[in-house]
Amino acid sequence: MLDRMTVSPADVDLAITRRIPYALPSAPRDAVPIAIVDVEHTFWATFQGGGRGYMATGASGGGALQLVRAKAHPEPRPERCQGERYQLVIVEDANLGRRRFCAYLPASSKAEPKRRYPVVLLLPGFGSTEMSYLAGKRHAGERLDDISKETKREAVLVGVDTSVPLGSTYLEDSPVVGAWDTFMATRVLPALEQALPILRQRTARALMGQSTGGYNALSFGMRHTELYAAIGASSPDAPDVERWLFSPGTRRVKDWIRNWGKIELAVGGAGQFTSWAASWSPDAAAPGGFRYPFDVETGQVDETVLARWVARTPHGLLRDPKALARIKSALSGRILITVGRRDDFELFGPAESFAKELEDLGVETRFLPTDQGHAGYLERFEPTLRFLLEKLDEAGARRPSGR
């Protein structure tokens, strides 16, 4: 819930006091406010403990906010990609800088140092990093271990840091976000193959992810069928963005989506729509260097910008006969899309219709609906990983192989 608060007195000098009386007249009685005093348009950075503004919390209903200045230089976090089964890989790029990849190695790798394994790249959700699936209780590596004990199939998992200052990259080459498609298509696999015990053939590589990561698995995997042989997408951002944006039977953007975009423009900094626009519709003449495909006040669509978005989506890619032929040849029977019927962001419909579109076009696709919402990824992770392990080639797994 986002709301405006009333401050009394109207003039507060933060040099004198850090306590601000306030009231939230339209909020529920038990609402506990979290306020961001955004002094330099660094809203999300301030919210996450950085930036140059203030964070404040208060009691439910009203009272006084207690402001705390965000740390201008947050203390570095301890290294999380470490341990007997973990290996950190840094890939340097002139355009993107130092990018992090965290590998989780199979249990047998220490005893069999010459063995090579299939690899699954884990693409994280919005604004997340290489540790998104590889940390915490029952993380992806532990789940893979359980599957491997049962199936005798092992793989290297590699978490990918797709976070950028504006939120997430959509793995496109963009003057705003950077040359991510080029980086992922030409730099990443050679670096991982040099550092990790993984097979080098396309048929031993897969992509999987949740939310933004699920979308990136579909989009990048379908664009680069020469690199990856299987895709697992959980609750992907809408593969058919038109179906998701519009109210049924109209060309007007749904009110909740329009308001979402409006909030992002108002607070500035990182955001979901900002990330899409920075990747799909960069424009040097526009504020921030990119354009939205709709007016956040009226919901009216900018058809020119929308056409650019659609062209970048998996749905748009299927309109290209040559791309469709490549996808059908390389990925038919090797794509799994799973999504919750109660997805909080209304992503069930677009995921279901895209899976049907693939089937209708001759690309065999496994569609796995669940009863969870958007956050039910843990329930969807194991069937997705099992599907990918079944599809990946283990040939030559006990000796290094050529590309």
Image (cartoon, helix red, strand yellow):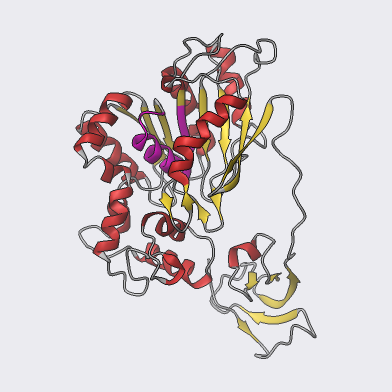
- Closer to the camera, 23 or 126? 126
> Which of the 4 image quadrants contains residue 261?
bottom left
Looking at the image, which residue is at 40% across and 67% down? 284
- Closer to the camera, 389 or 248? 389
The part of the chain drawn in magenta is 206-227
Tell me if residue 246 can be seen: no
> Which of the 4 image quadrants contains residue 159?
top right
Q: Is residue 221 magenta?
A: yes
- Could you say where residue 28 lies in the image, as x and y percent from the top left? 57, 70
Q: Is residue 209 left or right of residue 52?
A: left
- Could you say where residue 305 lies in the image, as x and y percent from the top left? 29, 62
Which residue lies most toward the right here?
16
Which residue lies most toward the front here?
94
Looking at the image, which residue is at 24% across and 57% down? 248
- Could you say where residue 361 lies in the image, as x and y percent from the top left? 20, 33
- Closer to the camera, 284 or 249? 284
